[in-house]
Amino acid sequence: MPSSLVFAVVITVSAFVAALVGLMALAIFDDWRRARGFRGAQAGRHEPYVFLFDGRDLIDASPPARVLLRHLPGGPDDWIRLIAFLSPRFAGLSDALDTAPGAGGRAFRANDGSTLELAGGPDLPLRLTLVPGDGPEADLRVDTLCQNAQELELSLLRDILDTLPFPLWRTDDAGGVTWVNSAYVSVVSDRSGCAPQDLPWPLPDLLGDAPSTADETPRRVALSGQPNRWFQIHSDRSTGAGQHVAVPCDALVRAETTRDEMMQTLAKTFADLPIGLAVFDRQRQLALFNPALCDLTELGPEFLMTRPAFHSFFDRLRDSRMIPEPRDYHGWRHAIADIEKAAATGHYEDTWNLPSGATYRVTARPHPDGAIALWFEDVSADMSLARRFRAEVQTCQAVFDHLDTAVAVFSPAGVMTLSNAAFTDIWGFDGSATASPVDAADLAALWQAQTEPSQIWDELVRYLSELGGREPWSAEVRRISGQRVVLRAHPLQGGSTMVQFRAEATNSSCHVKDRPGRIATPAI
């Protein structure tokens, strides 16, 4: 074999071996770099969060732990904030903190692979070591700008929730409190009498004394030991955990209590009224009635308690013959519609003469919120008395009209209240035909126009207006026709005055007798 060929083969084999060795070295270096980079990343991701507590006071913390504390929700102290963050993640942690972990310590594991180690003794500080897990939830690689924006928004939301005047809190599936705002802490502190920093964690649930509801309807709760503090609690468990909002409703409860007491007072008052009361709401359903309504309308309580409608109520009155007998049913329905319209404007009042002989005064008035109130009053006795009085007045008037002597009665104010037919015949004036009261001064002008000039009428007007004790008074005047008229005035009980006028045909001179024992002659 030529030496040149051997040399070429040696060169080729050497180059191949050198290339193979280089590739192997490159592969080994790449595997070593990958392994080192992975271990570095894992070491950064699994850097533990270490907290050292002496009782509930934070003594020291690792840099990652301090960063974590800065981003935890607010609370009275670092201990409560940290335990509130860890308890939902590590089952049994709250119970384990009640006893010392001992020399061997205790460990807890979360669902995402994170671990929490407790170490320390009764006389030693408590050491909490939190190591994040390997799951996707433990990935700490985030964008710095996004993280800053999220932290800013989170801080803003925390400030808003802490400034709200009503309590907010969150519970887990077992009902334990996992998060609260400042108003919740204040309520629990007032309820227990402890300062906020001395409250045990987890805090008690405000819903502990409230009955549960299946449909999550709002519940009204009075705090135990504070019966005057009421909250309307709204809950939402659609996400699994419970989210609750407690809205103070002390003023609403006081208003409802005052309203109920007022309604009871009104009910007792209405129960003693002799007037029947029926109140219909804006839908024209009977909302309130008193016992007198049952007695006056003869409608049983069993019917009234069914809250009949406005028209049904009057239909039942018609069937019971407790309304004036209508001529036809259609006219009756229109009359009921007119009652409803008039009542809505406050202008309905009528007197019902019932077939039984009783007389009712029915009044309708509008009430707030579109309601209507009906009042039924038995005025049979008053109407009977008024009829008797009217009959007596008519009888007296008939007696006066049959007297030959003209008579007029004047009130203490000098207004004519009564006159007879003879008075009309003499003076041509019918007092019963006038719609307005007639004053003595107006009548004096009438008399003066029909008689010869005299001061008698002025004296009569003065006599009628005098107060106190008076003596009977008499006088004579002459009509223009020459007829002589004798006047006699007699005081009556109550200050009224009766004046008699007697016409006499005589040619004697006119004279006046204005007081007993004195005769006055008027100027002619």
Image: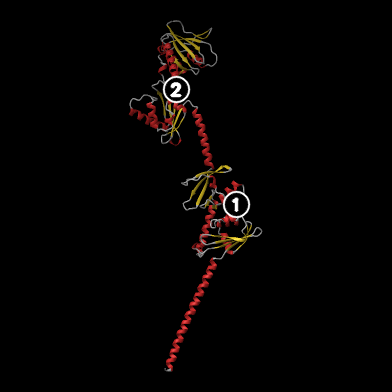
Note whether residue 237 is visible. yes
Q: Residue at x 45, y 86 (%)?
A: 13
Q: Residue 199: x and y, percent?
A: 60, 51
Q: Residue 16's quadrant in the figure? A: bottom left
Could you give the CA–CA distance between mark 2 and mark 1, rounded to whole angstroms? 73 Å
Residue nearer the viewer, 203 or 357: 203
Disc 1 residue crowd, few under 14, some 14–19, many 20+, Cα 10 Å:
few
Q: Is residue 26 above or below residue 406?
A: below
**Residue at label 2?**
379
Q: Residue furthest front?
A: 104
- Position of residue 300 in the picture relative to residue 36 (left or right): left
Residue nearer the viewer, 83 or 433: 83
Q: Residue 365's quadrant in the figure? A: top left
Mark 1 lies on a secondary structure that is loop
Q: Residue 140: x and y, percent?
A: 52, 64
| Mark sitting on residue 200 | 1
